[in-house]
Amino acid sequence: MAHFRGTIQGNRGRASRLGTAKSGLDVTANGWNGGVRVELWIQDGVDMANVELNGGSGRGGGKSKLIFRGPINGTHLD
């Protein structure tokens, strides 16, 4: 059963993918000069996330910078 849902909108319309508690969800969106990667998983019953900036599809040499790692439970929105 799906626990996570990712959506994307591009020139071919909208698409979505589901992730389970076991698989998690790993999403990458890149431009030529930079991009972002979001990983979602469950740890000890808590939804967790990593958010990283990367060099994009045109450069960067695989470098990335972690900008957030922690629980995602809605309380950070207050």
Image (cartoon, rainbow, N blue to C red):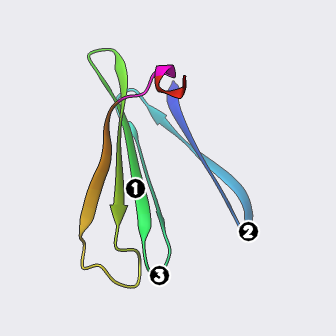
Image x and y of residue 73, in percent = 46, 21
Local SS, label 2: loop
Residue that mark 2 sits on? 12
Q: CA distance from mark 2 to mark 1?
A: 21 Å
- In this view of the protein, which residue sits in the foreground, 19 or 56? 56
Image x and y of residue 37, in percent = 40, 55
Local SS, label 1: strand
Residue lying farthest bottom?
A: 58
Q: Is residue 6 left or right of residue 37?
A: right
Q: Which residues are magenta?
A: 71-75
Q: Is residue 21 above or below residue 49?
A: above
Circle 3 crowding by C-alpha within 10 Å: few under 14, some 14–19, many from 20: few
Residue that mark 1 sits on? 37
| Res 34 quadrant in image | bottom left
- In this view of the protein, which residue sits in the foreground, 41 or 37? 37
| Res 41 quadrant in image | top left
- Tell me the residue at 47%/26% (across/down): 76
- Tell me the residue at 26%/16% (across/down): 44
- Tell me the residue at 41%/48% (across/down): 38
Q: CA distance from mark 3 to mark 2?
A: 19 Å
Closer mark to the observer between disc 2 and disc 1: 1
Residue that mark 3 sits on? 32
> Magenta segment: does it hold 5?
no
Image x and y of residue 60, in percent = 29, 79
Circle 1 crowding by C-alpha within 10 Å: few under 14, some 14–19, many from 20: some
